[in-house]
Amino acid sequence: MSETAKSKSNGLESIATVGDYIAASGRNPRLRRNTHHYISDMLDHFGPDVVFEGIFGLEDQIKNVVLFFHAHGTSLERRLLLFVGPQGAGKSYMVDKIKKHLDLYSHTEVGALWGVIGCPFHQHPFDLIPHTQRDQIKEKMGIRWFPEAIPCPVCEQKIRKHGSWDAVPVERIHISTTGKCGLAKHTPTDLRREDITNFLGNINFSKLKKIGSTYDPESFDFEGKIIWANRGLLDWTEIFKSRRQLLGLLLELIQSKRIDMANFPTVHVDEIVLGHTNFPEYQVFVNEEIMEPLRGRIFKIEFPYGLDVDNEKHIYRKFIERTDHLTGQTKHVSEDTLSFVSTYAVKTRRETKGMNGLSPRFFQDVMSVAYTQAEECIDIETVSTAILKMFDHKSHKDLNVDKMKEIFEKTKEEFFHERVETFINRIIPTNKQFTDYGQKFYRNYLDAVARNVRGDKLSPTEEGLIQEVEDLLVAKEKISPKGKAAFESVLVERYEELEKMPYDKNEQLGVVINEVVFNHVKNFLRLSNKTKRIDEQSREVQKILRDCLIKDYGYCKHCSQVLFKVLGEHI
Ligand SMILES: [Zn+2]
Ligand SMILES: [Zn+2]
């Protein structure tokens, strides 16, 4: 069914006056929603996954926002929704998502809203019901409405003009920032210019001349953020930077759903105020005695920077997937690279428990630069370069850049150290290819020894092999320098038995061969840093390591090559 057809069947298209609206609301409970309820329904209509699409790592915050709105009809309707967190933690992004979807929702059938035509507050039609008739209408229609709700001065005029409150015309309204309907944003940039008139409008002096009375709504411009935001959301950034006088206004707005206008009776408003602030400013506010009444009327959601490495990884992975999708490319990133960036991000924040450090925005830009500069892979070198580059491209207030760089160097050291440890303790002892490699080496050694004891002429490779093993045996004091010949003859005597044995079961040789294998890995890594041409032994080691990184650690050929190179610098 098309939207118009649906409207018709609900009789919504015939709503032309407050009276019509009240009649229609008897059939359609959606028309009885207040703003809190309306936003809650908007979130349910699209679903939080859609509304907050593209926001990663803020699952708890999203849950709490949804909870806040789901609590319509409770005390939370009279609370300031406050986002507290450092710059770039995703607060504004989240508010923008809510605003955008409120706009979209108001264009849907189920999100249809009506307001009094010509009312600067686009007041809800229920606001015009006289208090003397409320009980009667409530009984008849089951309508529950704000006891504070009254017509604004402009609506009062309309009631007089139309002869009756229920004859006042209404129209469908759409939530829109540019239309100054249901959305407004305030940022206290210049406190000297931040005036109550920004919120509540002002006398229009040219009209005043004609009209003569400041008490006539005709001589007043009802233009201001609180007025525009009625029926929706007032987005107030850096809220505690605002003048204290305005916070008094805010208190009245959220606790009584009313505002005092200088020359007019108190006006009723129904809007959600969503404030943002950072921790230091919040702390100052909390300690101010005069703020006591407001303090008790806050529903606070904290937005610290992420402190969970896995969560960070998830954010960056999602970011790359999204960029892939948007740019139509596919760039590779290994788990390890993501771990590295995430570990660094978390380390810069840990000391302050997420109140300071490098922001998600910083890392989003790091990943953007790395993505752009990467040919096929966002490898460990590309991200490292991007991180350092980003320090030059950002201005950092309240941030010790030298310290951040120091943490970076440390994270890098630790990361490389850990990777080498992984090779030694995890990959080399358990990887089948490496045990085969060790076994082959062990046998070659035994063969070389046998030939040596027989008195055959040895190749330089065989001589090197014997020396490599026996120097280590001496260093580990398993044999004495003079005992080499005796040791070799014992090996030859037991050749048949030893040759069949897994090398690591050999009491004397097992440890030594493991170390030989590790030394080969080290040699290979050192070489990878210096040259592209490597010897056959190193090529074999390279192949084993690479296969393992690809199979078990999400690397590709290119990324493993980069890792070998950087590890070579650190080994
Ligand atoms: Zn009005
Ligand atoms: Zn790769």
Image: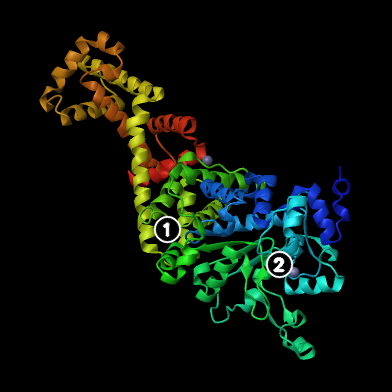
Q: Does the Cβ of the disc 2 residue fall within 8 Å of ligand 1?
A: no
SS at badge 1: loop
SS at badge 2: loop
Q: Callout 2 environment at 10 Å: few (<14), some (14 to 19), or many (20+)?
A: many
The N terminus appears in which quarter of the rendering?
A: top right
Q: Nearer the viewer, residue 420 or 223?
A: 223
The x and y percentages for residue 23 are 83, 53
Q: Nearer the viewer, residue 272 or 410?
A: 272
Q: Is residue 36 left or right of residue 82?
A: right
What amino acid type should be assigned to the residue bearing mark 1? Answer: Met
Q: Which residue is mark 2?
A: 150
Query: Do residues under tags 2 and 1 come within 8 Å of each other at their CB atoms?
Result: no
**Which circle's residue, 2 or 1, is located before the other in the chain?**
2
The C terminus appears in which quarter of the rendering?
A: top left
The x and y percentages for residue 267 are 67, 70
- Residue 214 lies, with reference to residue 117, above or below; the image says below
Q: Quadrant of ligand 1?
A: bottom right
The x and y percentages for residue 317 are 54, 44
- Figure quadrant of residue 173: bottom right
Q: Which residue is mark 1?
A: 355
Q: Is residue 259 left or right of residue 180?
A: left
Q: Nearer the viewer, residue 67 or 290?
A: 290
